[in-house]
Amino acid sequence: MTYVPARPESLVEDPRLAAPSWDPAERPRSRWFVVLLVLNLAAAAWYFGWLGHPARIGNLWLYGMLVAAELFNFAQAAGFWWTTARVRPRSHRAWDRGAVDVDVFIPVYDEPVAIVEPTVAAATMLRGARVHVALLDDGNSPEMQELARRHGVRYLRRTLHTGAKAGNINHALGHTRSPFVLVLDCDHVPRPEFLVRTLGQLLDDRMAYVQTPQYYANAGGGITAAAWAQQALFFGAIACGKDGLGAMFCAGTNVVFRRDALLEVGGFPEGSLTEDFQLSVRLHERGWRSAYVPEVLALGLGPEDMASYVSQQLRWSRGCLGTATTVLGARLPMRLRAQYLLSLMYFLSGWTVLIYMALPVVRILTGEQPLATLSGDQFVLHFAPYFALALGSVAQAGAGRYTFAAFALAAATWWVHVTSSLRALLRRPARFVVTPKQGQSSWQPRAVGPSLAAIAVLVAVAAIGLARERSPAMLNNVAFAGLHVVVLLSGALAALRHDRTRKDGRRAGPTPRSTRRRLQQGDRRLGLHTG
Amino acid sequence: VTTYLDSSAPTTVSAPPRLRQLAEEQLLGVASQGLAGAGNLGFALIAVRLLGQAEFATLATFLALYLLLMMPALGLSASTSIAPEAEARTRRRAARVGLVAAALLLVGAVPLAKLLHLPVAMVVLLGVAAPSAGPLALARGRLYGTGQHRAAAISLVIEPVARMTVGLWLTSRAGAVGGAAGVVAAGYIALLVARTVDRRAGAYQAVSDPSSSQRGVASATAAAFLLLVVMQNQDLVLANRLLAREGAALFAALSMVGGIAAFATSTIPLVLLPRATAPPSPASRAALYVALAVAAALGGLAAAAGALAPPGVFAGVLGQRYEAVAELAGMYLLAMALLGVARVMVAHQCAAGRARLMIALVAASAALQAGCIIAAPPTPAAVAVGTLTAMATLVIALAVTNVLPRLPLASRTARRRLRLSRPPVSRTGWIIVGLTVLALGLRLRITRGIWVDEATSIMQARMSFWRMLDSLQSTDVHPPGYGALLWVWTRAVGTGELAVRMPSILLGAALVPMVYLAGRALYDRRAGLVAAAFAALAPQAVWYGQETRMYALFMVLAVTTVWAQARILAGAARAWVPYTLASAALLYTQYFSVLHIAAQQLVFCAAWVYRARHGKPLRRDLAVWAASLLAIAILIAPLIPFAEHQMTVNEQSGRGFAAPSRAGAAVSGSASELSPYVFLANLLWAAWGYHSDATMTALGALWPGGMLLGLLLLGRGRSRSTGLLLAVITLPVVVLYAVGFVKRDLFDLRYFIGIVPMLCLLGARAATTWPRSRIASVAVSGLLAVTLVAGLLDQQLNEANPRRYDFKPALRTVEARARPGDVILCNPGYLISVVHYYAPQLSAQPNRPQALSSPGVSGARSVFLLGSFFNIPSEKAAMDASYRQLGGTRRLVREWQFANVKVWEFR
């Protein structure tokens, strides 16, 4: 399906111009989900009641680490259950206050024209308001200027490039004056009805912004698909739940702001890597409200290689963890504070992976174990229901969108969380890095280096263990080591394949590169290409 | 409605027939044939009383030869029902052939009479009858081929009417020869009527001659059916030639009884043939299923009636001299029932252009039958066994080609002649055949002897039928389905070690194509193939595919119900029939299958709710569902009082399911309590077979693999098919695990063995869809298969397998050392059934407290103490006590240890 009539037919192969294949509002029937959550709580009580008994303590340090990791995960799980249990359908509201002006900001840095052009073209065709599209070029690119000219949109360029994306937007705010501002990442092609579906929520005068999902149209396979599965869980059940709690934070793109709200907090914070997250905290702190419309109204591109993904995760984790003090110090209602903290905490979960990987290694090498000698029966009896139900609730809440690949990818980048938290703790400065919009074809072992090292250690230790003895306890620890190896390897494998982009492209439709080529071909046919 | 195979012939295009119409056609044919059969039987029954023993044997032989003379009766009928327009041309030829045959019979009457031990007059009468045979067959075939089923019915009924009147009058006047004359006269009367009632006579005169392709098919079909008639009758001829007079007479009576089943089903292929179009269409398949169902039901009922009828019934009907027919009636009627089914299959295959293959198969089976009869001892039982063996072989061979219709067996010429589109030549059929053969080979490679439960089943099968049922009801805990099957089987093939295991071996092999069909119905062809491969190799499928117990049948029926349910949910209404029948059969096989059926019913409920919510029409589904439930209830109604009585008796005696089912249940030290490891161990058994306790403990320690599996399931989505499989796996396992906390022994893999093929299907689904590339899929499938093979090898060859009981070598050892008067004490007492099987000549007693002081034991030179089931504390205590007591009064000469079995010799 295409809604860009001026384009030649070949352009419809750009995945961003196709209809989305995901409904963020799809979620389990609440009754069953509530039953599942109750069972989850019961299973958690059953497990932690057993685990917390003093008789379970083996090596105190290891036990402490295990309990800490388990409690951390439980807190995450409980937060997830709490959030997803508060999913409330948000009714659509139509804008009924007559014609309204909306500024559409498309910040760019040095992205290819082919990536940006569909976004600009689609932005000019937005319905439901008088749109004033502005291309905010921080890369001082003549091609971008030409692009803006071709599509008749405003071209804004700064002389001083401070504050990264936030600075770019703030600069644009000073040069525009519409009451509402739509921010689109340059690779996110909006659907014509974007404003029709969102502006109505801003009829509430205290509504600061309306967020919509960030959809990866290129999620055919590989890393993009795994990253998308993570996104789908967030922009599905979690975002809907956050909206039910009034705690939806801004994701930086596909979001419509009220100019007054932005101006009240001084625009986007320029000192943060996650300016959107910090902006949300500030707005909520001042009593502004937020809304989430669970409809795919813009189609973007996700990271296509491990380096891009790692770069994105590093920025998000470092940025979010950097705002921890802000969140803790903010005058937020408890509900909102807890929601922000829960979102921050996710970026610490790499530590639990590290602990879980370390436990079998220590047990095999030293014989020390966190739990006192016990029969495997007892551990399985208490742990299995908790584990199975927790997985079940994730699967159910994510409507089957959260995949093993997504889990493995998150596990394989455990070191990103560890690094970010350490840097945040040590207050090391961070640099805003734009997530690459195109995949690289060369293999990227460095992006998963720590995971590969962990795999090597686990394999070596398991081999040592098997060489020493084959007792059930040893086999059990070797099995745990094997489990980690399989998960890490599954997550890291995408970084070890040659020419993955081409293969993924074949599966998932054209990649941005091929899209660009088609766009160029189309432009030549239309006499639009100037180069 | 007439359908032709050749497009050049006139074609009446009409709507596909409904199931009801197909059933009505078949039932009309069967009813008229039944009436005709009843009349013919009445003629024979009256004749048997009018004539002496030898004279009746002569008349029975004449009847058989008359039938043989009527060989074209079925063959030509079959060919004409395919191509009715060919009748006019064929009739002239048939008349010429009939006249030639008549001339030959008349000329050779004297030597033939001597050869066949018949009066010359009878051979002459055969000659007189010869010219009528072809035209009569053709006339009837044309009636079927042109859809004149009522006219065909009239022509069928008129013949016995004539026999009963004219024939009996002549019998009373002129004895056996008079009876024979009456039979011949009845044939001519039937011919006259058949031609008179044909309203479409002459309708084809204006039509051009049938094409050569039609003629070819018709001729080949006639030949195949001719061979079937040979199979039906040659045993009688051979018996008359090989057996002594009394034996021949007995077999003649048996043949007459068996003829009921064969006769009752003989119209079914004729009704089917015009419907069996090629290439196969939904309508032709529906016609086939209806025909098969009717043939199987009629034959099965006849066989069951013959098996269950008390001897007095036969004595009353046939006369006291033929009371012994009762012993063989069930078996022989079963053989004739199989013939009925075979005829339907042959008809279908002939219409599909595989007549040559059919000729080859039937000819080979006929040769096998003749060989078996000639090679066997000259007894009526041996002749009956030969016939049953041949029929069973034929049906199995036909089943392979019928169930796998995509096999490229149709000759190219036949296809070209028939202008058939080339059948989709696929390797699938051959792969399934190969896997089935592999499965058969693996199951034939038996590495263990008979154990207690099997010996109990064999002991029961050796009893009379009613006594067996009584024994099951009063001393056993299982329904009578498998017992009845084994009872019939052992009547046919005896109780040798391989013989008693053969039903399970065959069922185990049959599991492979059934799993394939289920996999294809649930998912796709690839999943079906991989699942079939897993089913061939699955250690549990092999283990119970070798055991003389009901578990192989349980697995086959369970997967059949799942296949049928998948078809039903996909919209195939006719699958309700196999679903209903298989469900009822499942309940007759194992009581705990009620959990499997309950899970399936829950799936049905969920499907109906889903449909209702999505506004789909539901009334018809609900009506058929209710009818199916009602049919199941009616079918299992006789089982309810049986089960109730059985449970009462078992509860009163305190036996329940207590022994010996706990054998091998220990996996983590304590078998007396359920634990997660026991749960895990049973699931591991289901997937990878029985292994030593040490291996199971090690495998159990790998439970984090389960976590990985859980993670791998994330984002896999849900499908109705997988939901169905998970339901039939989960419900029985969870319920029996819960019940196990009350009655520990009920949580045992055997009682939910139906999950094994389901695991194969799930594994195949995962292996074929989880990997992203074909190569990875093949690699994963291969890897899983390798683990199954490893499990299978360890299970079959490792003597530490806790389910392995080496009674055979133990009893061979005792047998070698025992002298007359020696005693073998069995501990537990039920081991006596194994002793009776392997060493029936040994004096065996259960090891009871008073046994040691009994005269038989105290006076014996040697006392052998045979012990097993050491994991049951009470039995171990009893054995220790006896050991000490024997040690106090006698000298321990020697002791032997085998897998789970010990023997001590005290002297």
Image: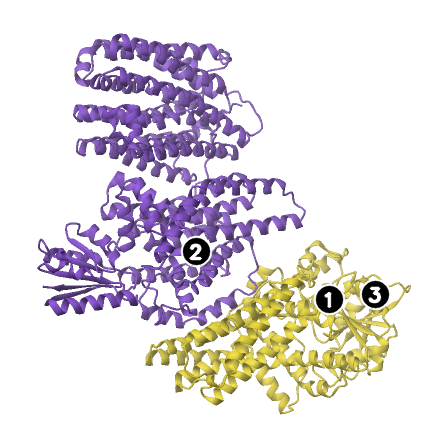
Residue type at numbered disc 1: Arg
Please name the residue shown 27% across and 25% down the image. B253
Question: CA separation, marks 2 and 3?
Answer: 55 Å
Question: In the image, which disc is placed on residue B742?
Answer: none
Question: CA separation, marks 3 and 1?
Answer: 18 Å
Chain under label 2? B
Say which element carries label 3. helix
Residue B251: x and y, percent?
A: 24, 27
Q: Residues within 10 Å of mark 2 (few under 14, many from 20)?
A: many
Residue type at numbered disc 3: Gly
Say which element carries label 1. loop
Query: Camera-side residue: B89 or B30?
Result: B30
Q: Which residue is mark 2?
A: B755
Shown in purple, the chain is B
Query: Camera-side residue: A378 or A333?
Result: A378
Say which quadrant the N terminus of chain A sits in: bottom right
Image-based side of B715 in relation to B174, left or right: right
Compared to B245, does B570 lie above or below? below
Q: Which residue is mark 1?
A: A88
Residue type at numbered disc 2: Ile
Q: How is the image coloured?
A: by chain
